[in-house]
Amino acid sequence: MERSSLRNWKIALPLVLLMAAGIYFTGRSVQAGGPEPGSSQDPLVTKSYVDNYINSRVRELRGQLDNINRQIAELEARVTALEQRPVIKLTIGSKTAYVGGTAKQLPVAPYQTGNGTSMVPFRFIGEALGAKVDYNAATQTVSYTTAAHSVILKIGTLSGTFDGRKVDIPAPATLINGTTMVPVRVISQGLGARVDWDQATMTITIRP
């Protein structure tokens, strides 16, 4: 029985090898004569598929580029608007201030406290910076509101609320001859402006 099985395997093995060789060489001939990869006849990746993919990516990149260009244009417009806002100049001890080169008379001259904090009329500085200004006599508070910022100070208090956050300030809002005076630097910076100080001329320059 074992010899018969062995004899059968000896006969079958060459046949299996011949069949495998035939399949192998047939596959090779089909591959050699097959379509070029990426061509319109390629069953896996057709040329139209590649074209559609490239076009979709180009459209996507163009959309991203258009979005970037819009953002750049918006930033340029904002920069231009900021550059066109007038520079504000005040001098310690002088009732004359300048907004964009135009002289303005102040009810009380700016002064400095003992710790060197410059104080200015609250309404003037707020309006010059384009803020809505409000005074609440009942709560003894002054407030400034712009599209981007809000500032609230209570007279006589060494803290304020800036954009909803409590912040310590170097000098409290103070009433002088009926005019509320406020620390110019913290108010201006709280409203998004830049403040420069010239010690030689005792001049405050505010750039919105």
Image: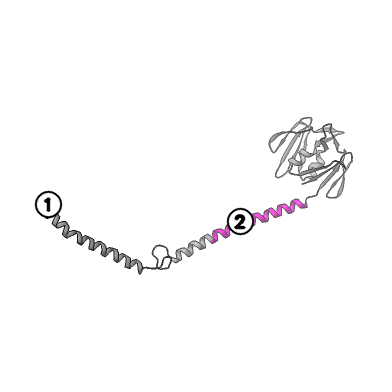
Classify 10 Å Cα crowding around label 2: few (below 14), some (14-19), many (20 and above).
few
Residue 1: % across, % down? 10, 52
**Magenta segment main secondary structure:** helix
Given the current orientation, which residue lies at the most extreme left position?
A: 1
Disc number placed over residue 67 in the picture, else none? 2
Q: N-terminal of the two: label 2 or label 1?
A: 1
For the residue pair 4 and 199, the one nearer the viewer reads as 4
2 or 1: mark nearer the eye: 1
For the record, the magenta segment spans 58-85
Amino acid type at circle 1 is: Glu
Relative to 53, say whether 201 is above or below: above
Q: SS of the residue at dot 1? A: helix
Residue located 61% across and 58% down the image: 66
Is residue 80 a member of the stretch shown in magenta? Answer: yes
On the image, the x and y values in percent for residue 75 come to 68, 53
Q: Which label is found at residue 2?
A: 1
Tell me the amino acid under the disc marked 2.
Asn
- Left or right: where 103 falls relative to 132: right
Rate crowding at label 1 as few (under 14), some (14 to 19) or many (20 or more) other CA atoms within 10 Å.
Answer: few
